[in-house]
Amino acid sequence: MATANYKDFEKYDPRRYLVALFAVERLKERATAHYIAQDIHCTRLEASRALESASKFFLVGIEKVGPVYSITSWGVLNKAAALRAISSDIDSNNA
């Protein structure tokens, strides 16, 4: 399974928010805006906005201690379904 990048999805596509969330989960204690942006191939501002939007639209609990983000709750999202939503499109494009 390929890892999704932020710009694999069109502007305003909420799957961009999911990509940012999974980057936070992957990076753990290294999940700063800088490393999230590097991981998902976008700017730090885009990464920060995606996390803010995920919190607003999906009620995801995101905590920021110093520069480090962490997910405290997946809100209304089903984590497995969210992962499928970003993975299936990427896998089909790579086939």
Image (cartoon, rainbow, N blue to C red):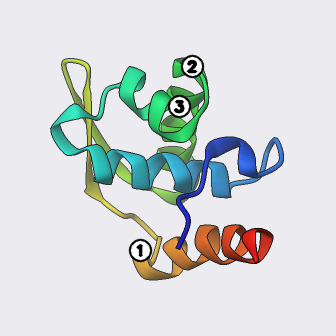
- Nearest to the observer: residue 31 or residue 59: 31
Give the image location of residue 29, x and y in percent: 16, 37
Q: Disc 3 designates what residue?
A: 47
- 79 lies above or below 41: below
Crowding at dot 3, Cα within 10 Å, few <14 / some 14-19 / many 20+, comes out as many
Q: Quadrant of the C terminus?
A: bottom right
Q: Quadrant of residue 69?
A: top left
Give the image location of residue 80, x and y in percent: 43, 81
Give the image location of residue 10, x and y in percent: 83, 48
Q: Is residue 9 left or right of residue 38?
A: right
Question: Alpha-carbon distance for marks 2 and 1?
Answer: 24 Å
Q: Disc 1 designates what residue?
A: 79
Crowding at dot 1, Cα within 10 Å, few <14 / some 14-19 / many 20+, comes out as some
**Labels 1 & 3 near each other (Cβ < 8 A):** no
Q: Is residue 53 left or right of residue 10?
A: left
**Labels 2 & 3 near each other (Cβ < 8 A):** yes
Q: Residue at x 76, y 52 (%)?
A: 9
- 10 lies above or below 67: below
Q: Is residue 77 left or right of residue 61?
A: right
